[in-house]
Image (cartoon, grey):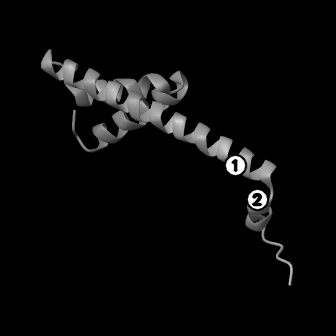
Amino acid sequence: MPSTDHTDDVASSGVAAEELTQFIERAERVQEEIDAAKGDLKDIMLELKGRGFDTKAVRTILKLRKQDREKRQEEEAILELYKEALKMD
């Protein structure tokens, strides 16, 4: 009985297998770049810490800088409202 499984099609087709291999190799290269970038970021954080900066605060700043200004302001306003309600100020 013939198989209709796509994986059999890929395995039996030289072109599809070659294309799949190219995708896998590209993904591996990107993963290597990501791992290297994570290592670089770790080094930066260690350097910051060594110079007396609070790395948790720096990570928060990095997160905030990624956000849209209006969204960030809305979140900060809600946070302030909640802190006031809990008498945290």
Image location (x, y in percent) of residue 69: 51, 22
- To which quarter of the image does residue 76 belong? top left
Q: Earlier in the sequence, mark 1 or mark 2?
A: 2
- Count residues near mark 1 (Cα–Cα under 10 Å), then give few for <14, some for 14-19, many for 20+: some
Q: Distance between the residues labelled 1 and 2?
A: 8 Å
Q: Which of 88 and 68 is in front in this view?
A: 68
Residue 25 position in % (x across, y down): 59, 41
Residue 84 shown left or right of residue 53 in the figure:
right
Residue pictured at 80% horizontal, 48% vertical: 15
The quadrant of the picture occupied by the C terminus is top left
Q: Is residue 8 above or below residue 59?
A: below
Residue at the image position 78 percent from the left and 52 percent from the top: 14
The residue that mark 2 highlights is 10
- Dot 1 falls on a residue whose secondary structure is helix
Q: In this view, does 27 lie to the left or right of 35?
A: right
Q: Is 51 placed left or right of 72 in the picture?
A: left
Q: 30 or 52: which is nearer to us?
A: 30
The disc label shown at residue 62, or none: none
**Residue projecting furthest to the top:** 51
Q: Nearer the viewer, residue 67 or 79?
A: 67
Q: Residue 11 appears at what percent x and percent y?
A: 73, 61
| Residue under label 1 | 20
Tag 2: residue type? Val
The quarter of the image holding the N terminus is bottom right
Q: Residue drawn 29% across and 24% down?
A: 58
Q: Name the residue: 70% across, 48% down.
A: 20
Q: Quadrant of residue 70?
A: top right
Residue furthest to the bottom: 1
